Image (cartoon, helix red, strand yellow):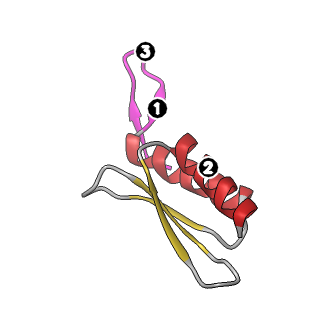
């Protein structure tokens, strides 16, 4: 994880490092699901494998993406 010096002299994770950690956490919570943050779109994305084929999801926040993944998995 990349870090920068904060105001108090402590190492603080960069926004990119925080997003990467968030994506890893979601992928650990949902094995088989690929999660990433779109730098160009500013959105969170997930490729969710389903019996009928993969489904691409987009959400404005990691929390909303998590809810979308859970909802999609319940339905199919």
Query: Any magenta on residue 11?
Result: yes
Image location (x, y in percent) of residue 39: 30, 56
Residue underneath mark 2: 66
Going from N to C along the chain, the mark reached first, 1 or 2, is 1
Q: Nearer the viewer, mark 3 or mark 1?
A: 1
Q: Which of these two is toward me, 1 or 67?
A: 67
Q: Dot 2: within a 10 Å radius of its alpha carbon, few (fewer than 14), some, or many (20 or more) residues?
A: some
- The Cα–Cα distance between marks 2 and 3, rounded to whole angstroms, is 33 Å
Image point 37% across, 17% down: which residue? 7
In the rendered view, would you say 9 is above or below 27? above
Secondary structure at badge 2 equals helix
Please state the extent of the stretch shown in magenta in the rendering: 1-13
Q: Dot 3: within a 10 Å radius of its alpha carbon, few (fewer than 14), some, or many (20 or more) residues?
A: few
Quadrant of res 71: bottom right
Image location (x, y in percent) of residue 58: 44, 57
Secondary structure at badge 1 equals strand
> What is the number of the mark on residue 8?
3
């Amino acid at each position: 994880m990349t870090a920068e010096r904060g105001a108090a002299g402590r190492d603080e994770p960069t926004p990119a490092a925080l997003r990467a950690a968030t994506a890893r956490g979601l992928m650990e919570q949902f094995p088989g699901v690929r999660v990433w943050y779109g730098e160009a779109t500013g959105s969170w994305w997930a490729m969710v494998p389903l019996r009928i084929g993969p489904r691409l999801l987009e959400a404005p926040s990691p929390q909303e993406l998590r809810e979308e993944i859970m909802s999609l998995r319940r339905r199919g």
